[in-house]
Amino acid sequence: MKAVIQRVSRASVTVNGCAPRSIGPGLVVLLGVKDTDTLDVCPKLAQKVAGLRIFEDAAGKLNLSALEKGYEALVVSNFTLYGDTRKGKRPSFIQAAKPPLAIDAYEAFVACLRRTGLAGVQTGEFGADMQIELVNDGPVTIVIETDDWK
């Protein structure tokens, strides 16, 4: 899996034109699932995301996590994270997982993230038309690739 994590002061996702799902300070997680991924990595990835020390402490050091700060997360599925641009100008998405694996992995990650103790977890909707609005705080953006864990 690949997770792009952004520290935000606020964020929201609008799914299919419905009312936005919003968070205050916390994390936006764009989650891509690779065709070779397995669900067993979801708990570790969720703990890693919730525990990332990317928020300032009293001394201004990046030393606190969203969990420690009592913050929220917004998780959005994003198959384009596995876009391969090595050839030509049109990305290939052959490595991106397809349903049911992609849906199962996304839902498993969200469930694991909810169990971490974050103040709240909002989500987009797999395969839906979504618009995301966010204020990237810092900016702080971290990329985690679980293939690196093998």
Image (spheres, rainbow, N blue to C red):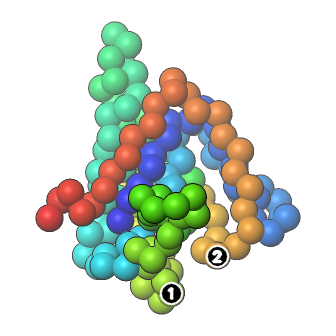
Relative side of 141 to 50, left or right: right
User: 135 above or below 132?
Assistant: above
User: 106 above or below 131?
Assistant: below
Which mark identifies residue 99? 1
- Mark 1 and mark 2 in contact? Answer it, CB < 8 Å: yes
Q: Earlier in the sequence, mark 1 or mark 2?
A: 1
- Structural crowding at the residue carrying mark 1, measured as other residues with C-alpha within 10 Å and reported as few (<14), some (14–19) or many (≥20): few
Residue drawn at the location 35% of the way across and 65% of the way down: 1
- Structural crowding at the residue carrying mark 2, measured as other residues with C-alpha within 10 Å and reported as few (<14), some (14–19) or many (≥20): some
User: 139 above or below 78?
Assistant: above
The percent position of residue 101, horizontal first and vertical second, equals 42, 85
- In the picture, which quadrant includes the C terminus? bottom left
Residue drawn at the location 33% of the way across and 17% of the way down: 61
Amino acid type for the residue under numbered disc 1: Pro
What residue does disc 2 label? 127
Compare residues 7 and 127 and report the one nearer the observer.
Answer: 127
> Across the whole image, how many numbered discs are drawn on residues?
2
